[in-house]
Image: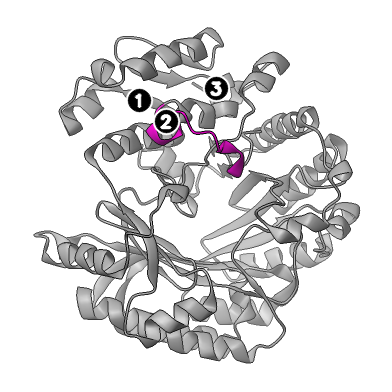
Amino acid sequence: MSTATRTPVSNHVMRRYDVPGPRYTSYPTADRFVEAFGSADYVRALQQRRSGVAAKALPLSVYLHVPFCESLCYYCACNKIITRHHEQAAHYLRYLSREVDLHTAELGFGQTVTQLHLGGGSPTFLSDGELGELMGMLRRSFSLAPAGEYSIEVDPRTVDAGRLDALAQLGFNRLSFGVQDFDAAVQKAVHRVQPAEQVFSLMASARQRAFESINVDLIYGLPRQSPESFDRTLDLVTQLRPDRIALYAYAHLPERFKPQRRIAIVELPGTAAKVTMLARSIAALISAGYVYIGMDHFALPTDALAVAKRQGRLHRNFQGYSTQPDCDLIALGVSAIGRVGATYSQNAKTLEEYRDLLDQGQFPVVRGLALSRDDLVRRAVIMALMCQGQVLFESIELAFLVDFQNYFGPEMQALAELAEQCLVVLDGTGIQVTAEGWFLVRAVAMVFDRHLQGDKNRARFSRII
């Protein structure tokens, strides 16, 4: 089905299915992690990886969390520490080094890494010298593949052309600029003021330095936004022409994220306005030549993400859509979430606990999950829906030795209702998400989420629209 035909759902269907639900960067989702899974369980997972017959042939992805930011963005739901005391970074690097050493003690030196992402917080809070120290630490412990993807999140307010030179020299070949919105009133409302001219200048400098892929993050649903104001932002973004665009719906959860309490609820756009923004965004970006990767990502046809989508290699991990399917993810730093084999793990969320565990010579893992066989089957189905927009019964049956329609009897009945609403098409071979269904693909995936059945506390999730 051509992405050019994607159209918004009716208001009736939108109201019916605009409910809180997971984003499915994993299944089961991180809220299902348990504290019974700790450092010892993580060590066993690493040892199983090392002892596996094909361990050396299986590449790693690495995510490293830098929690520091100089100023607070009111919409932010990330784990961050607001400070202007840059000396904290050097102390943090020492503990990261200990965590890396614990990994090499279990995995050995030289494990091949084909994907590295520095997130936060603001990784560019670190100085060029500190970033150089960090990359040197990683290169001493891991083997960074020559053709790997090495990306870093960039706060445009903290970077100039000289810093872009330093990032390129350190080996970063992908950048992600946090833009969110170009409208001055919206920027003021969320406490993140950065003129469009500054971002355009940085983009021009980045193009000159031949970074392989440049992403721009946008958020719709922010205070003081309207469909018309967001149209103007979209017009500027299409002029900017990044290789990738991540378009996220703002999730207002002030009971969970204290900074959001500074946002006036009356200034937030309503559901109908948000749906309009989403519909116009998809239309504008596709018209500008972008491929709709799914849910919240767009890419130019030549970008690796679009190529992976065409080739059926797309995957979702804890950072969103990825070109690397079924890849173990080593997570480093405060609150970082990783995956090794059939396990998920998360590090301590506070600096104090993170440091304390490392001081004891332990991995700072405080919660996680060992996936059951049922989890693995359902994960395969949910990821196929989220990434390819379809599930072929035969592929699941061959991989897991189940009869799909018997195994998922109640789910197939629930899907029949979604089919009546034209969100999916069902036949004897599989499930196909329709053009309208892509707007509510999370609702389709939720049908297969066993953990959500009977869940009375879904409000902890963001709403689908």
Quarter of the image for the C terminus: give it.
top right
Residue highlighted by disc 1: 391
Q: Residues within 10 Å of mark 1 (few under 14, many from 20)?
A: many
Q: Which residue is mark 2?
A: 385
Q: Position of residue 16 (x, y in %)?
A: 64, 19
Q: Is residue 330 above or below residue 427?
A: below
The quadrant in which residue 73 appears is: bottom right
Measured Cα–Cα span from mark 2 to mark 1: 6 Å
Could you tell me residue 7's position as x and y percent? 65, 21
Secondary element under disc 3, as helix, strand or loop, is helix
Amino acid marked by disc 2: Leu
Q: Can you see residue 286? A: yes
- Asked whether disc 2 touches disc 1, contact meaning CB atoms under 8 Å apart, the reply is yes
Name the image quarter holding residue 110.
Answer: bottom left
Residue at screen point 48% across, 16% down: 424
Give, as a three-letter code, the residue at label 3: Gly
Quarter of the image holding residue 166?
Answer: bottom right
Gap between marks 2 and 3, in whole Å?
Answer: 10 Å
Label 1 sits on what residue type? Val
Per the image, is 232 magenta? Answer: no
The disc, 2 or 1, on the residue closer to the chain's N-terminal end is: 2
Q: Which residue is mark 3?
A: 437
The residue under the point 64% across, 79% down is: 125
Q: Earlier in the sequence, mark 2 or mark 3?
A: 2
Q: In the displayed structure, does residue 111 sit left or right of residue 213? A: left
State if disc 3 and disc 2 touch (CB < 8 Å): no
For the magenta stretch, what is the residue range?
A: 448-460
Q: Position of residue 342 (x, y in %)?
A: 26, 51
